[in-house]
Image (cartoon, rainbow, N blue to C red):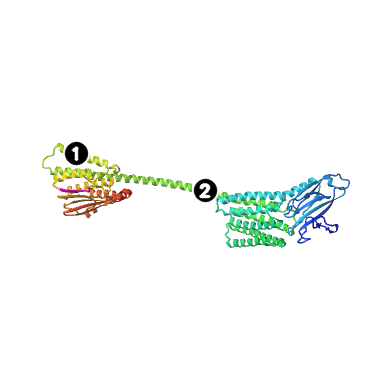
Amino acid sequence: MAQAASDGARPAADAWQPATLPDDWSRRWPGYGGSAWYRIDWRRLCPDAQPGPVALTLESVVMAGEVFVNDAMIWRDPQLTEPLTRSWNMPRYWLIPDALIREGVNTMWIRVVGVAGQTPGLGPVRIGEPSALLRHYEALKWNNRTLFQLNLIVSAVLGGLFFCIWVVRREQRTYGWYALTALFWVLFVANVLMTSPWPFPNTLMAARANVMVLVLYVACFCIFTWRFGGQALPRLEKALWMLSAALLALAAFTPDASLHWSQLVITLTAAAVFFANCLQFPLHAMRTRRPEHGMFAVCLLIFLFVSAHDLLRVLKLIDTGYAYTPFSSLVVTLCMSAILGLRHARNVKRIERFNHELADGISQARTELATTLEREHALAMANTRLHDRLQIAHDLHDGLGGSLVRMMAVVEQSSVPLQSRQFLSMLKLLRDDLRQTIDSGSSAGVKVPATPQEWIAPLRHRFVQLFDELDIASGWRFPPHWSPAPSALQCLALTRLVEESLTNVVKHSRARRIRVELRQPGPDVLELDIEDDGVGFDVAAVQQAGVSVGMRSMHARIARAGGTLKVSSSPGSTLLTARVELRAAQHDDAAPQRAAETAEASAAR
C-alpha cells in the first residue's frame, strides 16, 4: 500500500509498502487523512485447472473508495470527497467479468479515502469461487446490516409503543425513559447503517453526533434502570447528568485534530458508567427478590458481557471474529420489552381487580342506600300521616268544635224550647262548617278575599248573633284594603285563630266585651288583636301543662303561616296578638312549614 498523490492518482513504484488486511493506516501514518492505494496481485487458476468464474468480496472500506481490476474500474463510491460516502460497514460482492481477467498474474487496485482519527483503512478482501464467496458475503451482510436493521425496527416499534403508553399514563415514567432510551439506541444504530453523513456536513461532524448519542443513550438507560427498580438515587442522578453534560461538551468542542482521543475518552467513560449500572442492579434485585427485577438483572449481565467483549474488539485488544452486540441487543431488547409488558399486564390486572372491587362496593352501597331510602320513605309516610291527623284534629276543633260550642250556648241560654226549623238551621250550619273543614285541607286552592271586610264578614255575622243572644258587646275594626294581601295559608290560619279565640271566650271567659282588630303597621306586616274583659287564665301554666288543644292549634297554625302568636292574660283583660310577615311567607314557603313542624313537635311533647 502507499499514500496517493495529491490528486488521488496512484503513487510511484518506490512508494509502496507491504500491508496485512485488515489494515488501519493510522498506526502507520498517525494524523494522516486523505487517499491511499492498496495493490493485490493474484492468479486466476492453478496450471492445468478448468477455467471458471471469479468472485470478489470486500468487507469494509473506511470511509469511501473505488476498485479496479487490471486498470478497469468495477466499483466506485458516489462521494469520494467530503461529505464522504460511508462504506465502513457495507460488505460488497462482485462477479468479475471474464474479459477483465488475464492469464497469469492479475492486479487489483483499491483506492481508499479516509479521515484522520476515524481508523481509515481497508478490511479483508477475498477472491475465489463464486458460491463460497456468496455465502461468505451473505453472512457478512446478515451480521453487519440485517441484524442492525432488525435492531432498529424492533427498538423503534417497541419504543413507540411504550411512548404511547407513557403519553396516556404519565405517572408510568418507566415507560417514558424506556422510550427515550430506545430513541437514542435507534439513532446510534442508524449511524451503523447510514451510507451518507447526512444531515451532517462532513464525517467528523457525524462522528461527534454519534458519540454524543452514545452518551445520552447510556444516561437514559441508567435512569430507566433505576426507575424500573424503584430506586431513589437523587444525588447519583445529579452526578450522572453533570458527567453527561461534561462529556457532551467535550464531544462538541474538541478540535478536529484531537477528536480521536476525545472519542476514546468519552467512549471508555460511558462504558464504565454502563458497566457499573449493569453490575449494581443485580445486587438490587437480590435485595428486592421480585421476579421482574431478577429477569432484568439477567438481561443486564448478558448485555454487560457482550458489551465488554465488543468494546475490547473495537479497541483491537482481542480479535474473535464477529461482534456479539447485533445478536445480543436484539434479544435483550425483546426481553426487556417482555418484562415491561408483563409489568404492564400485571398493572392492568390490578386495575381490573380494583374496578371489580369498586363495582362490588358501589353495588353494596346502592343496596344500602336503597334500604335507607325505603326506611326514610316509610318514616316520611308515617310523619305525613301523623301530620294529617294533627291537621284534621285542629280543623275539627277550630271549625266544627267552635260551631258546636256556639250552638250549645244558644240552647243553654234559650228560655223556650227550640223549634224544628232552628234545629235544622243548626244542623245546616254544622254541615257547612264540616264542608269548609274538608275544603280547607289544602290551602293552595283557597281564594283570598278582595278586602279585609270581605274576609271577616262571615265570621262576624256568625259570632255577632251569638254575642247578641249572650248579651256580649263586640267591636270589629278592619282596614278597607290589603297592603299587600296575605297568602291563602295566612288567611286560613287567621280565620281559624279568630274562630278558636272567640269560641274560647264564649266557653271560658264570662266576658261582657270583646274587641277584634286587624291592622297593618308596616307594608309587609299584618297584626290581629283579639281582646276580652273576662276572668283570664294563667298562660304559663296552660302552656306548661300542654292540655289545651286549642292553644297548641293556634300556635301551630300561625307558625305555619310564617308568623308569631303572643298571649297575655290577667283578670279583666286577655289579649291575643298574631303577627304575620307577608313578604317572608310569599317568598319562602319552606320556612313556615319548618316553623310549623317545630311548633307542632313542641306542642306534641
Q: Residues within 10 Å of mark 2 (few under 14, many from 20)?
A: few
Q: Is residue 597 visible?
A: no
Q: Main secondary structure of the magenta part?
A: strand
**Residue 427: which disc?**
1
Residue 518 image offset from top left, x and y in percent: 22, 49
C-alpha gap between disc 2 and disc 1: 77 Å
- Asked if residue 476 lies in the magenta stretch, the reply is yes
| Vertical order, 488 against 36 (above or below) | above
The residue stretch that appears in magenta: 473-479
| Residue in the foreground of this view, choosing between 416 and 232 | 416
* Residue type, label 1: Leu
| Residue in the foreground of this view, choosing between 7 and 264 | 7
- Specify whether 451 is left or right of 117: left
Task: Give the quadrant of the N terminus.
Answer: bottom right
Residue 166 image offset from top left, x and y in percent: 57, 51
Residue 50 image offset from top left, x and y in percent: 86, 44
* Residue type, label 2: Arg
Residue 324 image offset from top left, x and y in percent: 70, 53
Q: Which residue is mark 2?
A: 353
View extreme (left): residue: 415
